[in-house]
């Protein structure tokens, strides 16, 4: 079996198209079928797609793009393995048109991964305000007044006359005494307003990942032009 070098089939002219008919098709070194239908693009003047009769894969026809396929004397060699045919578009009785051609080309052409870095929000912590009541003793001084009584005596040397009947009556004088005492009352006074405000800080984080890229090696032998 020859190496996968030769003429890219998308560069074949319309006169050379018959060379493809019934040629064996190799994917990853395995023969998977033979060339059947050929989709020739009049606008570009080249072969765009080839219909493979999937003898070894169990399907009547599978459209494959011309990109990357190399025409040899002993067959048509594809740059990908037979696993690419799993769930591939353009199978069986599908008629080739522009839409199907784009689907097939997207599925079978060389792939590579690109890094897609996004952002998502996740909780990393929390702040909680908790209010509780504590009791502490306090002291205060208040000046209190208390009424007191004391007896005063003043000498009087004055005659009261001859009528002394009321002079010797028993009498009782009562003077009420008042005093202040401390009265305690409590009132609630707002001392401070406490709240939470959220802010945003920004930082740059470097992410590292390994990306896969498909590569295609083309070996040429002799006077062969490869594009």
Image (cartoon, rainbow, N blue to C red):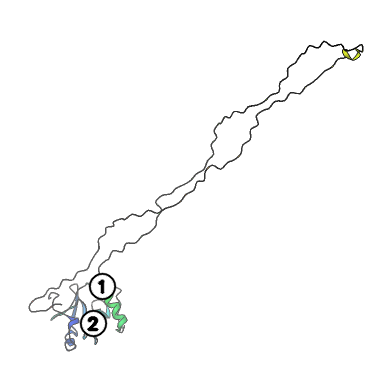
What residue is drawn where x is 32% and y is 81%? 99
Tell me: residue 31, above or below residue 203: below
In the image, taking residue 166 as reference, residue 75 lies left or right, namely left
Residue 190 point in image, percent of width and height: 56, 43
Q: Residues within 10 Å of mark 1 (few under 14, many from 20)?
A: few
1 and 2 marks in contact (CB < 8 Å): no
Quadrant for the C terminus in the image: bottom left
In the image, taking residue 101 as reference, residue 18 lies left or right, namely left
Q: Which residue is mark 1?
A: 84
| Residue 13 lies in quadrant | bottom left
Alpha carbon distance from label 1 to label 2: 18 Å
Residue 160 point in image, percent of width and height: 88, 12
Tell me: residue 69, above or below residue 208: below
* Residue in the foreground of this view, choosing between 113 and 54: 113
* Residue in the foreground of this view, choosing between 224 and 94: 224
Residue 185 point in image, percent of width and height: 63, 35
Q: Secondary structure at mark 2?
A: strand
What residue is drawn where x is 28% and y is 75%? 106
In this view, the residue farthest toward the front is: 158
* Residue in the foreground of this view, choosing between 156 and 35: 156
Count of marks overlaid on the render: 2
In this view, the residue farthest toward the bottom is: 15
| Residue 66 lies in quadrant | bottom left
Q: Which residue is mark 2?
A: 48
Q: Secondary structure at mark 1?
A: helix
Quadrant for the N terminus in the image: bottom left
Q: Earlier in the sequence, mark 1 or mark 2?
A: 2
Residue 150 point in image, percent of width and height: 73, 17
Tell me: residue 128, above or below residue 73: above
């Amino acid at each position: 079996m020859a190496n996968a070098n030769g003429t890219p089939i998308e560069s074949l002219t319309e006169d050379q198209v018959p060379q493809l008919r019934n040629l064996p098709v190799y994917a990853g070194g395995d023969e998977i079928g033979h060339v059947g239908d050929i989709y020739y693009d009049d606008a570009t003047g080249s072969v765009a797609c080839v219909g493979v009769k999937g003898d070894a894969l169990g399907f009547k026809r599978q459209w494959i793009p011309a990109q990357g396929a190399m025409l040899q004397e002993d067959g048509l060699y594809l740059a990908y393995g037979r696993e690419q045919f799993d769930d591939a578009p353009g199978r069986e009785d599908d008629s080739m048109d522009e839409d199907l051609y784009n689907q097939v080309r997207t599925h079978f052409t060389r792939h590579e991964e690109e890094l897609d870095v996004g952002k998502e929000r996740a909780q990393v912590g929390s702040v909680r305000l908790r209010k509780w009541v504590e009791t502490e003793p306090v002291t205060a001084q208040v000046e209190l007044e208390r009424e007191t009584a004391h007896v005063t005596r003043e000498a009087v040397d004055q005659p009261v006359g001859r009528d002394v009947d009321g002079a010797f009556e028993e009498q009782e004088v009562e003077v009420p005494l008042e005093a202040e005492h401390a009265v305690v009352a409590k009132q609630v006074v707002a001392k401070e307003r406490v709240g939470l405000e959220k802010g945003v800080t920004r930082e740059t984080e470097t992410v590292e990942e390994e990306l896969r890229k498909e590569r295609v090696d083309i070996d040429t032998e002799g006077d062969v032009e490869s594009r």
